[in-house]
Image (tube, rainbow, N blue to C red):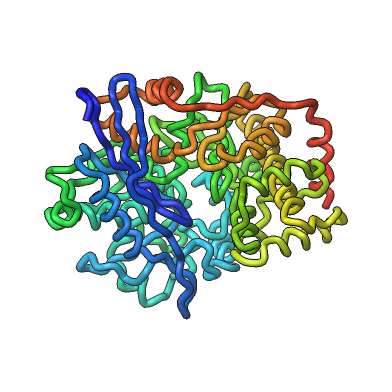
Amino acid sequence: MRAGVTSYAAVDLGASSGRVMVGRVGPDSLELSEVHRFPNRPVRVPEGLRWDVLGLYAGVLAGLRAAGPVDSVGIDSWAVDYGLLDADGALLGNPVHYRDSRTEGVAEKVWATVPAEELYAATGLQYAPFNTLYQLAAARGSAQLARAERLLLIPDLLAYWLTGEQGTELTNASTTQLIDPRTRDWAHGVAERLGIDLDLFAPLRRPGDPAGVLRPEVLEETGLTGPVPVTAVGSHDTASAVAAVPADGERFAYICTGTWSLAGLELHAPVLTEESRAANFTNELGLDGTVRYLRNIMGLWLLQECVRAWGEPDLGALLLEAAEVPALRSVVDAGDAAFLAPGRMPERIADACRASGQPVPVSPAEVTRCILDSLALAHRKAVEDAQRLAGQSVDVVHIVGGGTRNALLCQLTADACGLPVVAGPAEAAALGNVLVQARAHGLVGDLAGMRRLLVRTQPLTRYEPRGGTQRWQAAQARLARA
């Protein structure tokens, strides 16, 4: 290890795979390497779709063993899902997957007690059928919930197994629809009206807070020498990814791309207007008092499911073919809940085009171009709407996450938005995870300082918009009429 360089393990869990990355941070250096990757395969059992959280934990332990000596560990993952513990701290069954059908029709029952407008005014969270609030409403009366003494969101559950310490990290808690984004504390009135016991949740902690040290048994299994602290990071992977947006100043929009696209602005206060609710924007919490004002878009899940259905063809070749397909021939609403469930994605996209009277894409290249055009169009709409609703203009769009490797999507997003796109870093969530740990240990400064280090050390690609945006406006209008 170079003198003055400190190593941090970032456990970064996605919806289809997990990995452990090691970040090495120095006064003017930031390097990241992947030391272990493992699958994240949900399992369908008779009672529904579940996460194999024990398999994930085994992958985390194997990753820490491969990481070698580290100065701290941080964990980030997807949002909303949780594990329930009994009075002895034992897990009560595998956590339910957010794509499980148990929340179908639940929102309407919740709204009968707390109308959607009041819920948004109190929590600022966009409607999504899988929000933790609706999951808890769906679980009401179940034997499992009746036995539960503690609820831990996925990153907090894994941190508990590593350390024996329980906590609820704030950025992830803000996705539950049980946090007031103004006070950055629990929305006690909402929980009381809906009969949700907030004592189920462990005390809130913030990014940078200590989250315990690795238990002796974990040290023995991983070969690490203690004490090794676990540091709370932006444990919602989007919070970590937004922290790693290499922006200069505040006039930027961001799009975190991967299985989902999360497009919006970084604000200093939530936007809780009825117009914002109607536009389905969410106010999630970020670092240093910031608000992630964004819209969830279905994202590259659409393409991932199609590629799976086609037998895993070469993605690079497929994107080259898609680039030759005429632009905006057919588009779909990339935020439509009709695309949420797995399976038959090419057929569902074709059905949506047929129903709206557009040409039906047939070949994989045509379907792929339809998906990427649709995503770029959804990015444009989200960036436009966010600026209007928040009263904040932007000069550039930053794309971070796995979608930065898709040059066609990045270019189409620049074209659609009529703004330059800066793509990178691809490993934004892991980098944000590492940087929060480094900051907690005094190695980097504030959020702006973290971003300056990213600009100096990470490869970035700039895409300039080509031509005017008139055809994108026309396609947007066509989709709105469908």
Residue 367 shown left or right of residue 14 in the figure: right
Relative to 124, 191 lies left or right: left
The answer to whether one can see residue 188 in this image is no
Q: Which residue is drawn at 66% across and 47% down?
A: 317
Residue 271 lies, in percent from the top left, at 56, 36
Left of 225 or right of it: where is 290?
Answer: right
* Nearer to me, 334 or 23: 23
Q: Does the image show residue 330?
A: yes
Say which of 387 and 95 sits in front: 95
22 to 161, vertically: above or below:
above
Q: Where is residue 229 in the image (x, y as percent from the top left)?
A: 19, 42
Q: Residue at x 63, y 40 (%)?
A: 276
Q: Residue at x 26, y 45 (%)?
A: 67
Quadrant where the N terminus is found in the figure:
top left
Q: Position of residue 184 (x, y in %)?
A: 40, 40
From the top left corner, tell me how far across and down residue 226 is, in percent: 12, 44
Q: Which residue lies furthest to the bottom in this view?
A: 46
